[in-house]
Image (tube, helix red, strand yellow):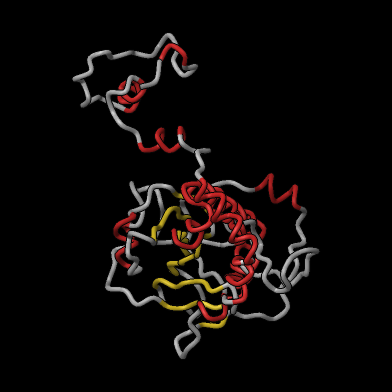
Amino acid sequence: MIHIKNKGLLHEHTVLLNDSSNLSNRDNKHLYTQILQGNAESPMISYLMNLNKQGLNDFKSIAKFNELNISGMYGDSIKYEEIIDETTIFLPQKKFKKIKESFSSIILKRRSGRRFHHFEMSIDTLSHLLKYAFGLSDVSLPGAREGKHRMYSSGGALYPISVYLYINNVEGLSNGFYKYQPGSHTLAPVDTDTINTAEFFAGSGMDMLNSCLSLFFRYDINRNYVKYGELSLLNSFVEVGVMSHNFDLVATSLGFVSCPVAGFNKNLIETALHLDQVNEHIIFSSICGKE
């Protein structure tokens, strides 16, 4: 139970409902007062209150991962994790053009866009977009394993987040789901049943009809839980935020707009992608198009 008088979250307009039997509240503000008084449970607050709680098992696991350089082994095995067959789509890898616009200009121009006009993204643009947002860097950095450095940071260099795309308007690609494979810079098609894309996102604000593509970020729990335990989820949320922002900035630099979306149809998309929904979860999404 949390003593509400010690919290700095209430003000003169807050209505406190002290009736412990009133758990069917009218909105989140009223539910929140019940959570603070211990009358209702919140997995989010329980997680935050135990955020830095670590046991001996955590210290053992972190030390063992570091000692054995397991993240390096993951990096070396990336080619064995990717599907290369007659269905694999190799994205253009001719010399990637540099983004000439200044970083400060891109930051200032970045904004979220949900409505688009019908436009077919070129396959070259998609290749640049995925390479700079999520791909492997060709630059050798001090202390980094050659060829294993990615365009974004990841807790312990374990990279538990993978990217799935729903292609909607891209040159030369059939509409449908694909998995981006950063090691080979390829797309692996995902066989799915007929799906209503209008149901991807909550509400009616997202223009799926005219979008070029949508992104869905998959979290594999076993990828980092063995090392970080209960801290894994926080690391993964931070990582997916970094990846999403990377994508926003690169899309902006290429003349497109994107919108990070937390309100997606989790069960529909996970079922379409054949995820087990125990170890594998979609935890974030984004949509991209041309205004």
Residue 129 in sight in this render: no
Quarter holding the N terminus?
top left
At 42% from the left and 78% from the top, the residue drawn is: 189
Q: Nearer the viewer, residue 10 or 124?
A: 10
Where is residue 231? Give x, y as percent: 51, 47
Q: Is residue 277 left or right of residue 169?
A: left
At 55% from the left and 78% from the top, the residue drawn is: 186
Q: Is residue 175 left or right of residue 78?
A: left
At 41% from the left and 33% from the top, the residue drawn is: 45
Look at the picture and state if 126 lies above or below 58. Answer: below
Where is residue 271? Give x, y as percent: 30, 64
Quarter holding the C terminus?
bottom right
Residue 160 in sight in this render: yes
Where is residue 265? Give x, y as percent: 33, 54
Q: Is residue 92 left or right of residue 258?
A: right
Q: Nearer the viewer, residue 253 or 40?
A: 40
Where is residue 169? Give x, y as percent: 46, 69
At 51% from the left and 66% from the top, the residue drawn is: 119
Residue 130 falls in which quadrant of the image?
bottom right
Look at the picture and state if 60 lies above or below 280. Answer: above
